[in-house]
Amino acid sequence: MSWALAFNGFDAGAESGVRWSLQPLVKPPIPTGSTHPIDAFVSRRLQEMGATFSPEADRRTLLRRLSFNLTGLPATPAELEAFRMDVLPGAYERLVERLLSSPHFGEQWGRHWLDLANYADTHGNDHDYARTNAWPYRDYVIRAMNHDKPYARFVQEQVAGDVLFPSDPQATVALGFLAAGPWDETLMVGVREDTVDHAMAQNLDRDSYVTSVMSTFQSLTVHCARCHDHKFDPISQREYYALQAVFAGVDRVDRAYDEDTTITRRRSELATRRDAVQRRQSDQLPELESERVRVAVRDLVDRWHRRERNWTLLATGSDSVPTEQREPLPAPLAQALRLNDTKSSVESAKQLAWLVLEQLLEREWQSIPTPRLVYAVSKDFAPKGSLKPPSAPRPIHVLARGDIQKPREAVSPGTLRCIAGLSSEWNLSDTTNEGRRRAALARWLVADGNVLTWRSIVNRVWHYHFGRGLCDTPSDFGAMGAAPSHPELLDWLAVWFRDDAQGSLKALHRLILTSATYRQSSRVHEAAPQMDQDNRWLWRMNSTRLSAEAIRDSVLQLSGRLDLTEGGPPAVQFVHRGAATFMPDGGAPPFLDYSAQDPDSLASRRRAVYRFIFRTVPDPLMEAMDCPDGAFQTPVRNSSTTALQALAMLNDPFLLRHCQHMATRFSEGAPGSEEAVTRAFETILLRAPSQTEREAFVLYARQHGLANACHLLINSNEFLYLD
Amino acid sequence: MTTSAKRPIRSRSPELGNELVSTGEDPVLMARRRFLGNIRSGLGGIALATLLGDAGLMAGASRSPSLRGGLHHPARAKRVIQLFMNGGASQCDLFDFKPRLEQLHGKAFDPGTGARVEASISTPGAVMKSPFSWARHGQSGRWVSDQLPHISGVVDDLAFLMAMTSVSNVHGPATYLQNTGFLLPGFPTLGAWVSYALGSLSENVPAYVALPDSRGFPYNGRSAFTSGFLPADHQGTVIQTVAPEPIAFLKPPIGAHHVTEASRVAGLGLLRDMNARHAAERPGDTRLQARMQSYELAARLQLAAPDLMDVDGETTATRRLYGLDQSHTSQFGRNCLVARRMIERGVRFVQVWSGHGGAAGNWDNHGSIPGELPFIARSMDQSAAALLLDLKARGLLEDTLLVWTTEFGRMPFSQGSVGRDHNGGTFVSWFAGAGIRPGTSVGESDEWSWKAANDATTTYDFHATILHLLGIDHSRLTFRHNGIDRRLTDVHGEVVQGILA
C-alpha cells in the first residue's frame, strides 16, 4: 500500500479527518468558573457529567503524595509537623516549592526519563557486558531536571547536542540518550563484517535510534513502518527509512567529553595553535615573537654552550630539580642546537623559536585534564572487530518487508510528512555530513509547529502526576492509541508550556500541583458518578502504588542508612563471580548474586537511581516490583500484584536487614515497646497507631521483636499505596 | 492503577466458542480489564479470579470440558516440557546423517549453487564428516550417531523436525528467536505466552517454571525466562535445583534469625487485619484485596515448593533411570526428574536447559566436535530418554508434550581443525507425547546438512505447533504493546501438520 493510500485510508477512517494528535495546536479559551486553568477544564467536564470534585485531601495525605511524587522519598514526621503548623496561606505552595528545589527532585523525575530512554549499565543480549561509561548520561538527565533545562534545548541536546551546541560538553553527554538502549556486542563487534547477521544488526541498531526518538519525543509508533507502510497511522515505509538515514553515520561507542567548558575552550584554542605550529604559520602565531619565547631560546642556547643539556628548566621554570632527574632535551631541539653552531644565526634562531614554542605548547596540551568518556553515538572512533567508523553516512535503502537482503530504492535523510506546515525534507547541501542530518531532525522536533512534541511532553508529565495520562497511551498518539479524556486541556497545556512557560518543566509541575484537581482526595465517595468508576473525568485523585525504587529508597531512609551522595559511577548492589565475567570483553556471561550482597555496604545504601542496572540479570526485588529491565522503553510501568512480589517483600534480605535497623532506631531512647511501636507507625506511615493497632503491635513486638513489626508495616497496603 | 497495555481477555461467544477478543474502548470492560491485569497471579490466577467472583470473565475456555483445556479448539496437550540445548546442538553429528560428508571429507566446501558460504565468526573451512559412527534405530529406521545411545532407543516415540531454520546465526538473537519469536530482547517467551493464555493447572504452583543448567544461566541471562511486556506474573519461576536457595525469596535468608515460623504466622494475621481495615475505608479498590490474596498464594507456594523438588522420595529405580547415581548425568537428570514432578503437580510449562552461556560447558562446540560434544551429549542423553520413558510409564505422555530443541545447528565444514561454527540454515528438533505421531519426521536438509532443502520448519511454525497442541490458535493469542498487537509468531507461523497424530 502506498503512502498516499495509507493516508487516505486513515483520513476516511477518522471522524474528524485528522487524528486529534496531528491537528494544529491552538490554545482553547479557558472555561469560566474556576481561577485555575486546569480546574476550569476539568470541572467543566465534571459538570457535564453531573459530578463535582472530591474534597481536598488532608495534609498528611498531601505531604505523602507530594513527597513521593517529587522526590521519591517518604516525608518525615518532622516535615508533617511543620506542614501542619504552617497555618498561613500558601503553606501548600511553599511545600511544593521546597520539594521542586530539592536535589532529589531530579533523581525522581530523571528516573522517569530514564524509563523512556531505556537506560542501563550493561549492553544487554547474550554476553551482556558492562557499559562502564553510561552513567554520565544518567547524571546529565538528573541535572537537567534539577536545573529545569528548557524542554526544547533538552530535546535537541539528546539528538544532536554535539552539533548544535559544540561549546557545551554536556550537550555531547546528552547523546547518551540515543545509545541508552540494548546493543548487541556479539553482532556488532564479534561476528564477521560480511555476514547477513552483522548487516541485520546494523539495521536494527538504526531502528533503535528511530524508535527511541520518535516514541519519546513524538509519541508515535514509527517503528511499525519498518516492514511495510504503517497500518494505522500516516507513516510510510519510505519515511521510516528516511529517518534511519538520519542516523546512518553514527555508531554507539565511548565518546570523549570535557568536564567543563573552560577545558573545552582551552583544548580547542590550544589545538588551533598546535596546528599553526605544525604548519609553521607564523602569521597566526604572534607569540612566536613574544618575550617568553625569545627568553626561552636565549636561555636554551646559553645553557647549550655551558653544556647544560636538559629541558627541565625550560619546562618547569625551576633549576632546583636534581641533575639526575632532569629530563633530556627532546631530540628535535638537541638536533637544532647542534646545527645552531654551523648555520647562520638568524635562520637557526627562528628555527629554534618554532621548536621551543612547539615544545611549550605540547607541555600545555599534556596538562589539560584527560577527557572523560560517555557511552553515546559518534562518527569517529577506533575500529574494534567488525565495528568500524563509516567514512560517510552508510547508504540506506527501503527494505522490502524489512528484509536486509531485499533492498529497494535508496532514500535521503528526512522525516515524517504528517505534521502540517513542517517540511519533511531538508535538502541538505552536504550529504556526507551526518551531523547536519541529526541537527535537522532535532530542529524539526522542537519547531513550534511540531504539535506532537508539545502534546507529548505535557501528557507525560500529567501521567506521572496522576498515574495516568490525559491520553492513556503516552508513547502512542496514533490511531491505535487512546483518545484523550480532556483534549482541550491537553492542547491548552501544550501551548501554555511551549509559549508561556517557555518549556519550563518546573513551571508545568507547579501549575499541575497547585490545581484543586491534583489536591483532591482519592477516596470513592457517595456522590461518585456511577458512569465513571474508572475516574476518567478526574472526580478524585488516583491512588498509585510506590515504585520499586521508592520502596527501596524509603526503607533505607526509614532505617536511617540512606546515603544521599549524588551522581557518579553506579553503585554495584550485587556480588559477581570473577571480575573478568563482569567487565567489558569478559569471557562468559555474568553470574550475579543479589542476595549475597551486604545490605549494609556503602553501595547498597545509595539511592536506587544510582544502582548498577544489569539488563539481563535484574535485581529480583526490583523486578518483582515492576522495575523495567531495560529491554524496552517503558512509558508506563506495570503495577502488577503477584505472589512472587509478596514473597520478595517478605523474604528479601535487604528489606529484612533494614527493618532490623529501623527497630534499633525506633527503640533508641524509647522507654518501652509502646513508645517504639508508636514511633514506628509515625515514621513509616506518618500517623500514630489506633488503640487496637497499638495493642496488637505492642504484643507482637514483645513476642517477636520490633524488627518483625516494622517489616509488617513495610508490607502493609497503607505503606505501599499512595492515597 | 496503570497497565500499559490493552490486553485481550477471554470471553464467551456462543457462535465462535471461546476465543480471545480485543475489547475496544468500552469503559466498563476497560476498568475490568485493568482490574484483572492487576490481580492475575502466576499462582493460579484463574483460581484467584474464581475466588473473587469473576469466574465468568476469567475462566473462559480453559474450563470448558468440550475444549479439553484449549482456548480456541480442543487441546491435545495439557502441559509442555521443553528441553533446550543451549549453544547450538550439532545436527550433523547427532541426527542428520550425510554420506556426502564422508565422501568429501577434507575437500573444499562448495555447495555448487553459487550461494554465498558464510560463517559467523570464522573463515569457512573444509568439508568435515562427523567423527562419530552412525546407525539406524527402531522400526522407523532413524539415523542417530553413537553419541546418543539412550535416545536411539526411543526414536520410535519421537517425531523429528529435520529441517528447522533460524534467521540468525548468533546465540543471543537466535536464542531470543527460539524462545520468543523475535530477535530482540523484551518479548515474552513461549512459556510466558502459555502462562498468559492458560494459567496454571493448580493454585499452588506457578504456571511456568525454568530450570537452568546448574552451572549457570543460558545466553541472555534471566531474560531467557522473561514475561517481556506481559504482566510480571507470567515470567518463568527460576528454580535452581542444586542451589542452597532453589527458589528466590521462598524462605527468609539464613542470617535472619529473628524471623521464625511463629513470627511469620502471627505477622501475616496482623498484616491481614491491618490491610482489611485499610481496604474497608477504600471500597471499590480491588487492588487492595488482590494484594492481600497474593500473600495467601505466596504461603501456598511456600508449602508446595519443597515437595516439587524433593526427589528423595522417588524410588531407587527411578533415580537410577534418570542417572542421578552417576556424576555426569546427575544434574541434568535431577532437573528432568523435577520437571516430571512439576507437571504432575500442575505446572503448565517447564523448560529444562542443558548447557549454560559462555564458551564451554554447552553445545557450542567451536573448538572440537570430537573433544567437546561427547561430554555435553553424555550429560543429557540418558536423562532425556528417561524422562520420556517415565512419562510414558505413568500415562503422563498422553497429555504432556515433550520437546527437544536448540537455537541453531552447526556447519558441515570445519572451523579450525575439528570444530564447527553456527548454522541457522538447518537444524533438528523433536517432539514426543500428546498429539504427536510417533516415529515420523518432517523436512529434509540438503545433501550437506548445510541448509534446509524440503519442508523447512521456521521458529514460528514450531511455536504455532506447540500452541496448536495446547488448544490455542497462534494467530489469535495477542497482547497490545506500544501500539502493536503482538503475537508469539509475529505475522508468520503454520502448524506443522506432518508430525501431528
Image (cartoon, helix red, strand yellow):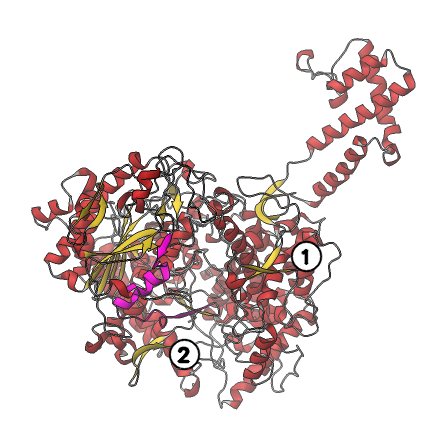
Determine which of the numbered discs, if any, sits on residue B30 in the image.
2
Residue linked to disc 1: A437
Magenta highlight on residue B459: yes
Q: Considering depth in this image, is B114 or A384 the residue closer to the camera?
A: B114
> How crowded is the residue under tag 1: few (<14 C-alpha within 10 Å), some, or many (20+)?
many
Q: Are marks 1 and 2 on the same chain?
A: no
Q: Considering depth in this image, is A42 or A348 the residue closer to the camera?
A: A348
* Highlighted range, magenta: B452-481
Q: Position of residue A453 (x, y in %)?
A: 62, 68
- Secondary structure state at the residue bearing disc 2: helix
* Residue depicted at 57% across the width and 57% down the height: A209
Location of residue B62 by image quarter: bottom left
From where the camera sits, is residue B119 visible? Answer: yes
* Residue depicted at 64% across the width and 36% down the height: A370
- Secondary structure state at the residue bearing disc 1: helix
**In the visual, does A646 lie left or right of A225?**
left
Q: Position of residue A710 (x, y in %)?
A: 33, 57
**In the visual, does A573 lie left or right of A136?**
left
Position above or below: B100 against A685: above
Q: Position of residue A218 (x, y in %)?
A: 59, 67
The chain carrying label 2 is: B
Location of residue A322 by image quarter: top right
**In the visual, does A101 lie left or right of B493?**
right
The chain carrying label 1 is: A
* Residue depicted at 76% across the width and 57% down the height: A429
